Image: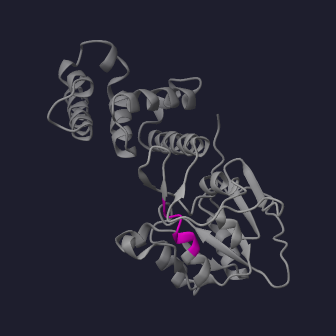
Amino acid sequence: MSFSLQLPKPIPDFDILSHEACFLILDGSQIEKLELLLLQQDLQPQAICPLRFLPLREVSPFIIKLTPTAMSWFTQYNQANVGYIISSDANIDQLATILSDFFEVLSPYGSKVFLKVGQPEVMNVILNDQECYLWAAISKVWLPTREGWISLCHDEKIALKKKREIYPLSDQQWKQLGDITRRNTVEKVHQHLSTYFPEALQQHNYPLLWITEWVKNAHDMQFETDTDVLHFFNILALLGENVLKTDRYPHIKQLLETASAQTPSMRVAKADELAHKEVSHVK
């Protein structure tokens, strides 16, 4: 397992029909103050966000016309999986509205979940569904993922599903999106440890496999958010795996393993605080 975090090269040619235009869709949950950055470049961003979710506008995806200035900004930003290009004969307002329909989707279990419409790897899962009614507005898509560029177009022989109030994910799509989420978490942990605890990574011949294993353990212990998981890895980095395998730190082990009136997030945050105190006492 390895990560390529930069925009993959070479950048493909965006071949389109004469009546179409290209647009760049960017992920506001990964690019801080995205709308402001785009406005400063005079790129006229449109938010991809339903009215009922306007409080989430700041971290929503944005769509802009793919001008030379926009492409130059995107290549200089030089990050994989933070944006992608589509071609369409629709205008930017129509596309923002249509894409907003996918801001929230239906899981196979009947629950409504948010979809990262600005992430190429997520949209690769959605647009591999050749019956997805989003293809009614898109001719082609170019997705810069961490494994390289992926280009998709609709097979005209395949009929599109009728538009529904909310797009239903299949079991396969749900699994694929879960795999992406876990990979994102592993990447965040690796970046966090590289910054704050590089010595913890150096102890392992295959640090990404070690992180992957312990991310699964953290999730099994009900530490599910990225913040929870980072607290959990702080503890492993400070005190080692023996914090769970021995009784050397019983007060911390109990917080991690034993359910209580506190939420799992509260317990792991407290355990992280205590782990830092243990290390400061040693010093």
Q: Is residue 101 magenta?
A: yes
Quadrant holding the N terminus = top right
Q: Position of residue 47 (x, y in %)?
A: 50, 77
In the shown orientation, is residue 246 left or right of residue 141?
left
Q: Is residue 146 left or right of residue 267?
A: right
Q: Residue 77: x percent and y percent?
A: 62, 66
- Residue 84 in view of the camera: no
Where are the magenta residues, as a range? 98-104
Q: Is residue 85 above or below residue 210?
A: below
Image-based side of 222 in relation to 155, left or right: left
User: Does residue 138 sit above or below 181 in this rendering?
Assistant: below
| Residue 51 appears in the rendering | yes
Q: Quadrant of residue 7?
A: bottom right
Q: In the figure, residue 69 lies in which quadrant?
A: bottom right
Which residue is depicted at the point 23% across and 32% down? Answer: 271
Q: Position of residue 79 (x, y in %)?
A: 62, 59
Quadrant where the image shows the C terminus: top left
Q: Residue furthest left?
A: 261
